[in-house]
Image: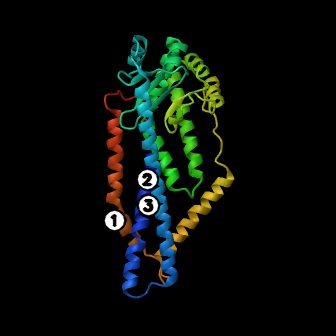
């Protein structure tokens, strides 16, 4: 929920900041008080806002196209699920949510924002025992129950929108790694560590599909050391730090953005009042409420007909 709160808070701040300079500029212009410097700073700030908005929309559209491509490929490769897969899916509460793909590689992944589902490759099904299959499905079930495909989209959109804060991209990668480790802990608790460890070692190469960008997938060498270490010690390993350079650049970017906003909203040295800021946030609140309502609607669609598991 922290990611959702952060995304919606950033949304509200952008709306409020966007609504402050324009009314002020209009009122000062009517009184012939708007200087050339103020006009330039206002234009620069609005350009930054437009670029931020365009980046966010571009990211959402790109992810939507990738999701459609992935959905088409899944439908093309879909096979009739054998009884062993259907039975294992039912045991972990994923009845009707698991599809079998005609692929020799060993992989599985959770996909879909409105209706999250699990894809399991034929190679994985043929290469694991019954206990390992349940561990894989329990891992993916964590992603489905916690609506991780939707949250991954939010995280990617947030980091793309505020491109001048590079620490957000590092935080996004840490967040996705943390979700994988959390899913592993859930699977180990429900199925035991040995079956999950066996499944991880069998699918270490993961999938070579380019369409899997932004979906939750088991397998791949990127997090193998951390995931194995967690299974061995029973504790979550320390993830890589963000880095001082990224933190410094992020603070600089945020400071420049704030300075540009204050410069665009100030006329003849007059700083905007607290009342004007409050009015701007009150004007932006209804639009932010629409964003909150849209998120909860999508989250409700994603959780229909699925037993509630471990909370986010």
Where does the image place residue 18, in percent across and percent down from the top left?
42, 66
Q: In the displayed structure, would residue 187 be above or below residue 37? A: above
Q: Which residue is mark 3?
A: 13
Looking at marks 1 and 2 on the same chain, the residue that comes earlier in the sequence is marked by 2
Where does the image place residue 255, in percent across and percent down from the top left?
58, 65
Q: In the displayed structure, would residue 159 be above or below residue 181? A: below
Looking at marks 3 and 1 on the same chain, the residue that comes earlier in the sequence is marked by 3
Q: Which residue sits furthest bottom?
A: 32
Q: In the displayed structure, would residue 177 be above or below residue 168? A: above
Where does the image place residue 266, in percent across and percent down from the top left?
48, 78
Where does the image place residue 193, in percent across and percent down from the top left?
57, 19
Q: Residues within 10 Å of mark 1 (few under 14, many from 20)?
A: some
Q: Which residue is more in the foreground, 83 or 103?
A: 103
Q: Secondary structure at mark 3?
A: helix
Q: Secondary structure at mark 1?
A: helix
- Across the whole image, how many numbered discs are drawn on residues? 3
Q: Which residue is mark 2?
A: 57
Q: Report, in whole angstroms, how far the alpha carbon at label 3 lies from the one at label 2.
A: 17 Å
Does residue 294 appear in the picture of this structure? yes
Q: Considering the image in quadrants, where does the C terminus appear?
A: top left
Q: Residue at x 65, y 27 (%)?
A: 229
Q: Residue at x 38, y 87 (%)?
A: 31
Q: Considering the image in quadrants, where does the N terminus appear?
A: top left
Q: Which residue sits furthest front?
A: 76
Nearest-to-viewer mark from 1 and 2: 2
Q: Report, in whole angstroms, how far the alpha carbon at label 3 lies from the one at label 1.
A: 11 Å
Asked whether the residues under the numbered discs 3 and 2 touch, taking CB atoms below 8 Å apart as contact, a structural biologist would say: no
Q: Secondary structure at mark 2?
A: helix
Label number found at residue 283: 1
């Amino acid at each position: 929920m922290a990611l959702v709160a952060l995304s919606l808070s950033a949304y509200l701040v952008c709306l409020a900041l966007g609504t402050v300079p324009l009314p002020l500029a209009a009122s000062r212009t009517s009184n012939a008080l708007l200087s050339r410097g103020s006009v330039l700073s206002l234009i620069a700030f609005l350009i930054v806002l437009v670029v931020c908005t365009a980046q966010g929309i571009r990211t959402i559209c790109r992810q939507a196209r990738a999701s459609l491509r992935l959905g088409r490929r899944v439908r093309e490769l879909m096979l009739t699920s054998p009884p062993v897969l259907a039975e294992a899916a039912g045991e972990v509460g994923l009845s009707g949510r698991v599809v079998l793909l005609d692929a020799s590689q060993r992989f599985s992944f959770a996909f879909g924002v409105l209706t999250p589902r699990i894809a399991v490759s034929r190679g994985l099904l043929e290469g694991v025992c019954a206990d390992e299959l349940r561990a894989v499905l329990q891992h993916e079930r964590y992603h489905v129950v916690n609506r991780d495909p939707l949250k991954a989209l939010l995280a990617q959109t947030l980091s793309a929108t505020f491109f001048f804060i590079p620490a957000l991209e590092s935080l996004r990668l840490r967040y996705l790694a943390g979700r994988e480790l959390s899913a592993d802990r859930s699977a180990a608790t429900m199925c035991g560590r040995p079956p999950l460890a066996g499944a991880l070692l069998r699918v270490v190469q993961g999938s070579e599909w380019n369409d899997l960008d932004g979906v939750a997938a088991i397998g791949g060498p990127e997090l193998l050391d951390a995931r194995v270490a967690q299974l061995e010690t029973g504790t979550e390993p320390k993830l890589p730090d963000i880095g001082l350079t990224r933190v410094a650049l992020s603070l600089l970017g945020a400071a420049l953005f704030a300075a540009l906003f204050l410069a665009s909203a100030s006329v003849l040295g007059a700083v905007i009042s607290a009342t004007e800021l409050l009015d701007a946030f009150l004007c932006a609140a209804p639009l932010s409420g629409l964003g909150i309502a849209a998120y909860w609607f999508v989250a409700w669609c994603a959780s229909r007909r699925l037993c509630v598991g471990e909370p986010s």
